[in-house]
Amino acid sequence: MLFKDITILDEDFEAQPHRWVGVEGAVITYIGDAAPADAARFGEAYDGRGKLLMPALYNAHSHAPMTLLRGYAENLPLQAWLEQKCWPFEAKMTPEDNYWACKLALAEMARFGVASMSDMYYATPERVQAVEEAHMKANLCEGLLAFEPKPYSEYPICQMNEQFVREYNGACDGRIVIDYNIHGEYTSNEQTCRDIVAIVKEKGLRLHIHASETRSEVEECRGRHGGLSPIGYFDSIGAFDVPCTAAHCVWVDEGDIAILADKGVFVANNPASNMKLASGFAPIPALLAAGANVCLGTDGMASNNNHDMFKDLYLMALIYKGSTLDPTVITPRQALAAATRMGALSQGRKDCGLVKEGFRADLCVLDTDGPSWCPCNDLLTNVVYAGHGSDVVLTMCDGAVVYRDGEYPGIDLERVEAEVAERTVRIQREL
């Protein structure tokens, strides 16, 4: 595809009007201020007038099949939400349920400009199938609740993960990546966690965890581990000596922040979920000031209710001004970088997340002719504060269109919605 005469956000997130951007295969091969001499080689010419081309978004923390629980577990604190509602419901979910629910999540993400997700859940083969069919990207880890202190090798998931790495890691021209998972300090034990970290280090893989989501989690962890916070505990067992994404990090102190920054941990901020579960506000301004890597996620649909990352982008850019009483914190550029480039890096995708020659063509196009875009004193500010996920008219992943003007080339949306609705009713009847 050749995007012609379109405004872009360049690799520095600066607005550049009247650009031509050429995509060949999975890669951006041309960016210029005029049409390339051999424009025909790019195939379709896309009229960019009144449009913005920007990097697609990367959902750095999701539980995609939890679309089945959308609106199901409401008005509860985290532990009651998990133990009374989510875990009993999830125990009834079959692999096929996970497949259809994941397919619905991918459709929703693609609709709102997301090309890739870091997904922590179950039924990995079915999630791989859903991602492959949607022609999107995902870092997938199989969820583990390891309450019983025993070697990781004695858990069935150990052999499962070895198989997943052999069969799926790097599949679909690298669109599929298999990560390892520690759900959280409070849902695991030290022996099993140390074994997981050793495997991740040996195999050169990545780790995805929950950490310091609630105040009670931190207080209870300190009681179990000689005063160590979840961040201090994970650091002590080597979890941050491997590439790691730590979701939430709401209740972290200065010492925790120093560890996260020093170890290069990717902190996946989930502002909507953190507020909905009344967990609090991650200290993102302090994390950024310390040089920590901050990315952005939606979390699951039982604690957010939608995969429109433009809403999370807006919240991230806005709430810290109010919570810190400082209108200068979290610039639009910082927020958008968290949703795009930093999200890609959190997944180990170094050639993704920017509109740049030689990078993978993970892109989205926004219609900027709507009333909320006028006037445009600063395009980047409009994207973050005035833009909506519904402004997305095209989403591209590795050069393939995965959403365009209401159509999903890899997803039969009507079938998916019917399957998810029926399966949700069945599970609720079984509870």
Image (cartoon, rainbow, N blue to C red):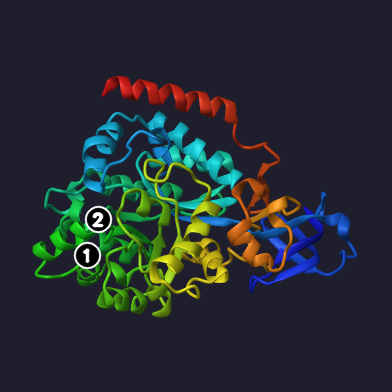
Using a 10 Å C-alpha cutoff, classify the residue at mark 1 as few (fewer than 14 neighbours), some (14 to 19) or many (20 or more). Answer: many
Judged from the image, the secondary structure of the residue bearing numbered disc 2 is: loop
Residue 134 pos. (x, y %) = 57, 41
Residue 155 pos. (x, y %) = 20, 46
On screen, residue 373 above or below 381: above
On screen, residue 305 above or below 282: above
Residue 324 pos. (x, y %) = 39, 71
Q: Would residue 344 be seen by someone viewing this image from the given angle?
A: yes
Q: How many marks?
A: 2
Could you tell me how far apart the alpha carbons at marks 2 and 1 are, in whole angstroms? 8 Å
In the picture provided, is 273 more to the left or to the right than 136? left
Residue at the disc numbered 1? 230
Residue at the disc numbered 2? 184
The reply to whether callout 2 and callout 1 are in contact (CB within 8 Å) is: yes
On screen, residue 411 above or below 144: above
In the picture provided, is 412 more to the left or to the right than 200? right
- Front residue of 167/116: it is 116
Residue at 22 percent of width and 64 percent of height: 230
Residue at 28 percent of width and 58 percent of height: 213
- Amino acid of disc 1: Pro
Residue at 80 percent of width and 56 percent of height: 2
Judged from the image, the secondary structure of the residue bearing numbered disc 1 is: helix
Residue at 76 percent of width and 52 percent of height: 369
Earlier-in-chain disc, 2 versus 1? 2
In the picture provided, is 383 more to the left or to the right than 215? right
